Amino acid sequence: MPASLQRSEDLAEFKRRIAGLEPDTRGLWGTMDAHQMLCHVSDQIRVALGDLPTKDRSSLFTRTVLPFLIIRLGMEPPKGKVKTAPEMKTTGATDWEADREALYGLMDRMAVATETTRHPMFGLLSAETWGLLSARHLDYHLRQFGA
């Protein structure tokens, strides 16, 4: 069963992994540092919750085939090669602990979310699908930093 931020045991495990990160934790790929990554995954959850509006960049292919491959089948994106929507790099890193606590709060909100919103590439997603996608995204970036 794929992990979801809407499943309490998965949520707790993600928080445990995040707690093990330090601001100077080095990435194994990509250009973000650990603090930028925390802000990036927070922005992705803000998009999911409807707090951060995004521009629709979807196509028939990205709304139908890609969500199935990535979210349901677990296809791994190529490390460091996928460009994110600019909105998901909105929040600047400020204070490590405050930014980590903000991420925990967003994760808690995602855990009980019932509303749906649009993903910039995948189109309208259910709260359940956002929970799965957010977990996959968070796992990808935590693995990027060895967590």
Image: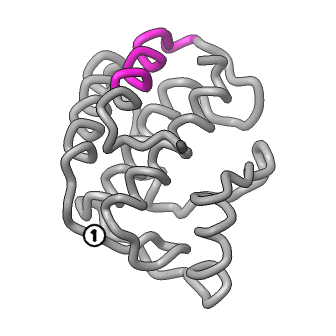
Image check: 50 left or right of 83? left
Disc 1: which residue: 116
Q: Which amino acid does the dot numbered 1 rest on?
A: Thr
Q: Is residue 129 above or below residue 95?
A: below
Q: Residue 109 at what x, y percent from top left?
A: 20, 44
Quarter of the figure with residue 101? top left
- Check the image and name the residue furthest to the front: 1
Q: Residue 44 at what x, y percent from top left?
A: 42, 52
Q: What stretch is highlighted in magenta?
A: 12-24
- Check the image and name the residue furthest to the bottom: 60
Q: Give the residue at x 29% y 31%.
A: 8
Quarter of the figure with residue 38? top left
Q: Give the residue at x 67% y 57%.
A: 73
Colour pattern of the rendering: one colour
Q: Residue 65 at what x, y percent from top left?
A: 67, 77
Q: Residue 114 at what x, y percent from top left?
A: 20, 61
